[in-house]
Image (cartoon, rainbow, N blue to C red):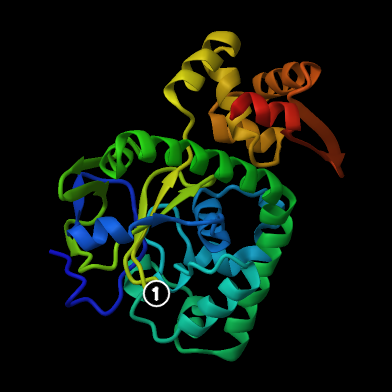
C-alpha cells in the first residue's frame, strides 16, 4: 500500500491498470483544494512526451526526454514541478533530479540513464537542452491555444462549483475518477491511500493528458491532473453537427499538429485526416500552413469559440 508518510519519493502516477489510488479529504482539505491558475508547462510537456506527440525527426533533439518519459512506465517524480513559468520549472526539475531511486521504475536502462542517475554534469546539461527543445518545438507554438482551452475549462468548473458544490465537481472530473465523500478514488497503476492532512489538493486541467495523473510529492500540495473536457451539452451538439470523428479532429487541433500527427492522435488514416482538416479549414475553424515538407493545422479563433 502507498502511504505519503513512508515513501520519500515516487513516480507521477498515471492512469492505467485496475488499481485504485484513494485520496482522503478532511474538512480542511476541502477548504484548501483549489484549481491551478494557469496551465503547468512541465506537466503538459510530460504528457506530450509520454504520448509520443512529436515528429520522429524531433527525436534527436529530445532524446533524453524520450529515455526518461516512457509510454508504459511511471514518470520520475522530479518532473512534477508546479511552477507556472517554464524556465522556473526547468530549474526545479534539474535541482530535484538527484540520486537514482527512480531508475528501477523505468525497466530497461541505458548508458545515458545510468550516467544521468550518477549526476553526470554533461547528462544534466543534455536534459536541460532537451527540455528547452521540446518547449520551443511543441509547447510554445500552441501555448496561446493551451491557455484558452485551460481558461474555458476553469470557467466551466467554477460555475459548476458555485451551483453544485466542490464534491459535484470532483465527481465529474473524469470517468476514471470517482468521489465517495470523503474519499476521491482514482483508477491508476498504483494501489494505496493518501491522506492530505489539511494540505488540500491542487487540481490541474491538462490539454495533453490522456487520463488522470497524480503527483503526490510536488511541493506544498499534492497535484491531480485530468484531461480538459467539454460540457455534455457541447459534446452532444458538436457531434450532432459535425459527426464524432470530425469532432475528435477539432479537439485534437487544440494543439498544432501535422496531418500525420493528427491521423495518429485520432486513430484514422492519413487521407481521412487530411479530408477532415480540409473541411474544417473551409468552414473557417482550422488554419493550415506548410512547415518544410509537413503541413501543420491548428484551430482558428472561430474554432476555439465553437469548441468552448
Considering only vertical position in the picture, is 212 above or below 75?
A: above
The residue sitting at 55% across, 19% down in the picture is 245
Q: In this view, does 177 lie to the left or right of 254?
A: left
Q: In this view, does 5 lie to the left or right of 58?
A: left
The residue sitting at 50% across, 79% down in the picture is 111
Check the picture and name the quadrant holding the N terminus.
Answer: bottom left
Badge 1 is on which residue? 219
- Residue 107 appears anywhere in the view: no
- Foreground pick, 164 / 280: 164
Residue 11, picture quadrant: bottom left
Residue 289, picture quadrant: top right
**Residue furthest to the front:** 162
Residue 29 image point, x, y percent: 25, 61
Residue 5 image point, x, y percent: 18, 76
Q: Is residue 186 left or right of residue 69?
A: left
Considering only vertical position in the picture, is 297 above or below 144?
A: above
Residue 26 image point, x, y percent: 17, 59
Considering only vertical position in the picture, is 207 above or below 252?
A: below
The residue sitting at 77% across, 16% down in the picture is 283
The residue sitting at 18% across, 64% down in the picture is 195
Determine the secondary structure under disc 1: loop
Q: How crowded is mark 1: few (under 14 residues within 10 Å), some or many (20 or more)?
A: few
Q: In this view, does 103 lie to the left or right of 228?
A: left
Considering only vertical position in the picture, is 154 above or below 281?
A: below
Residue 171 image point, x, y percent: 27, 38
Check the picture and name the quadrant holding the C terminus.
Answer: top right
Amino acid at each position: 500500500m502507498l502511504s505519503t508518510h513512508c515513501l520519500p519519493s515516487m513516480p507521477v502516477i498515471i492512469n492505467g491498470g485496475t488499481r485504485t489510488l484513494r485520496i482522503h479529504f478532511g474538512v480542511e482539505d476541502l477548504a484548501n483544494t483549489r484549481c491551478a491558475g494557469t496551465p503547468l508547462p512541465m506537466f503538459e510537456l510530460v504528457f506530450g512526451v509520454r504520448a509520443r506527440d512529436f515528429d520522429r525527426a524531433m527525436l534527436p533533439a529530445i532524446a533524453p526526454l524520450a529515455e526518461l518519459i516512457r509510454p508504459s512506465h511511471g514518470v520520475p517524480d522530479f518532473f512534477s514541478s508546479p511552477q507556472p513559468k517554464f524556465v522556473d520549472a526547468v530549474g526545479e526539475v534539474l535541482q530535484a533530479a538527484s540520486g537514482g531511486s527512480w531508475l528501477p521504475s523505468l525497466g530497461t536502462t541505458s548508458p545515458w540513464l545510468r550516467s544521468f542517475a550518477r549526476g553526470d554534469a554533461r547528462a544534466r546539461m543534455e536534459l536541460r537542452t532537451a527540455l528547452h527543445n521540446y518547449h520551443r518545438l511543441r509547447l510554445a507554438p500552441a501555448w496561446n491555444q493551451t491557455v484558452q482551452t485551460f481558461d474555458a475549462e476553469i470557467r466551466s468548473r467554477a460555475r459548476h462549483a458555485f451551483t453544485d458544490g466542490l464534491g459535484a465537481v470532483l465527481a465529474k472530473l473524469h470517468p476514471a475518477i470517482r468521489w465517495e465523500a470523503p474519499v476521491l478514488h482514482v483508477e491508476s497503476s498504483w494501489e494505496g491511500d493518501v491522506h492530505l492532512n489539511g494540505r488540500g489538493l491542487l487540481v490541474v486541467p491538462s490539454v495533453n493528458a490522456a487520463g488522470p495523473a497524480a503527483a503526490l510529492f510536488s511541493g506544498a500540495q499534492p497535484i491531480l491532473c485530468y484531461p480538459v473536457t467539454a460540457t455534455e451539452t457541447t459534446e452532444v451538439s458538436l457531434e450532432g453537427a459535425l459527426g464524432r470523428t470530425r469532432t475528435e479532429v477539432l479537439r485534437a487541433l487544440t494543439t498544432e499538429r501535422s496531418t500525420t500527427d493528427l491521423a495518429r492522435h485520432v486513430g484514422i488514416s492519413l487521407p481521412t485526416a487530411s479530408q477532415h482538416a480540409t473541411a474544417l479549414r473551409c468552414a473557417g475553424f482550422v488554419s493550415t500552413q506548410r512547415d518544410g515538407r509537413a503541413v501543420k493545422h491548428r484551430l482558428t479563433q472561430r474554432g476555439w469559440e465553437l469548441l468552448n
